Amino acid sequence: MENDASMLATYSSFYVDESGDLTFFVKNKPANFDNATVSKYFMIGMVRIKSDIDEVSQAFDNLRAELLQDPFVKKIPSAHKIAQMFHAKDDADIIRREVFKLIQKFDFSVQVIVRRKQVILDKIKEQYKQTGIKTKISEKDIYDSMVSALFKRSLHKNDCKIYFSQRGKTFNEESLKLAIGRAKRNFCIQYNTENTHQTNIFSSQPQHHIGLQIIDYYLWALHRFYSYNDDSYFNLLKDDFKLIIDLDDKRNHKYGEYYDHKSKPISLEKVKGAS
């Protein structure tokens, strides 16, 4: 699956996906984010595979082959989909359990940006009250700003390749390059240093890169943590979440909350009560 691993030996490789949606209005009315038809949160996350990529890919290929031969799995109508890729939302529990167990065997580093959609919508409403001008919520601007924040501190150490899960025409490779360029500039401004490392950006499908399937699983676990107060899946992988930035939880800091697994681990109790 990752047959260019030897060519990437001098690079850091990042795999980026999202969880949730950017729907703010339903039938021209503000969405009810407590309604299951739209998500309450939108997240963008990246994983860096620190283990040998060939070994990781082979292990997941082996698991896929094993599951497709399992008589219990064969009875599941949708099980054949894993022949193409693993996808946490669609995978049956018996499949999901095995994928989580396999993920725990390798060394992955994950960072995630979390946005609270109600906070974004409230800001737009407040602006309208003050100015009388209707402001359109730009999905592209939200996505690009999150990508910039996600990579601000990750691109200055060495050359890298970034694989984004394809999102359609709005978020093409050109717009992603602009977001990454903004992340580099922000780092240079804040730390007064120049980033001369090369960054190559690709928009691809999860079935072509095991890294995109892996970050999907991490995001699914974190989304359940936030949306359903369910930390059971998150706890299986919590030490791999090196940084979680909850941008809209400004109860204590105007820049949001920054959680890491060592000095400030996240918990259901800490995120409770924010909008």
Image: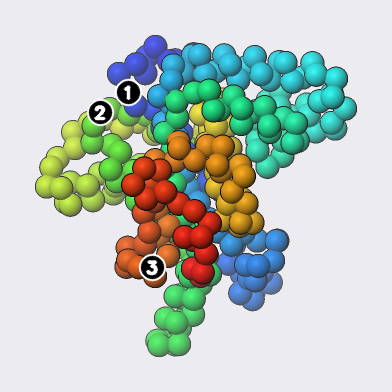
User: Which residue does the numbered mark 3 point to in the structure image?
Assistant: 250
Label 1 secondary element: loop
Marks 1, 3: nearer the viewer: 3
- Depicted 104 relative to depicted 147: above or below: above
In the image, residue 147 sits, relative to residue 93, either above or below, namely below
Q: Which residue occupies 49% across, 14% down? A: 54
Residue contact at pointers 2 and 1, CB within 8 angstroms: yes
- For disc 2, the neighbor class at 10 Å (few under 14, some 14 to 19, many from 20) is some
Which of 66 and 28 lies nearest the eye of the viewer? Answer: 66
The numbered mark at residue 158 is 2
Q: Quadrant of residue 201?
A: top left
Q: Amino acid at mark 3?
A: Lys
Q: Amino acid at mark 1?
A: Tyr
**x and y percent of residue 14 in the render?**
41, 32
Q: Secondary structure at mark 2?
A: loop
The reply to whether dot 1 and dot 3 touch (C-beta < 8 Å) is no
Task: Count residues near mark 1 (Cα–Cα under 10 Å), then give few for <14, some for 14-19, many for 20+.
Answer: some
User: Which mark is first along the chain, 1 or 2?
Assistant: 1
Give the quadrant of residue 93: top right
Residue 4 locus on image (x, y percent) = 44, 15
Quadrant of residue 31 within the rendered picture: bottom right
Tell me residue 153's x, y (percent).
28, 43
* Residue situated in front as seen by the camera: 39 or 165: 39
Mark 2 vs mark 1, CA separation in Å: 7 Å
Q: Is residue 198 visible?
A: yes
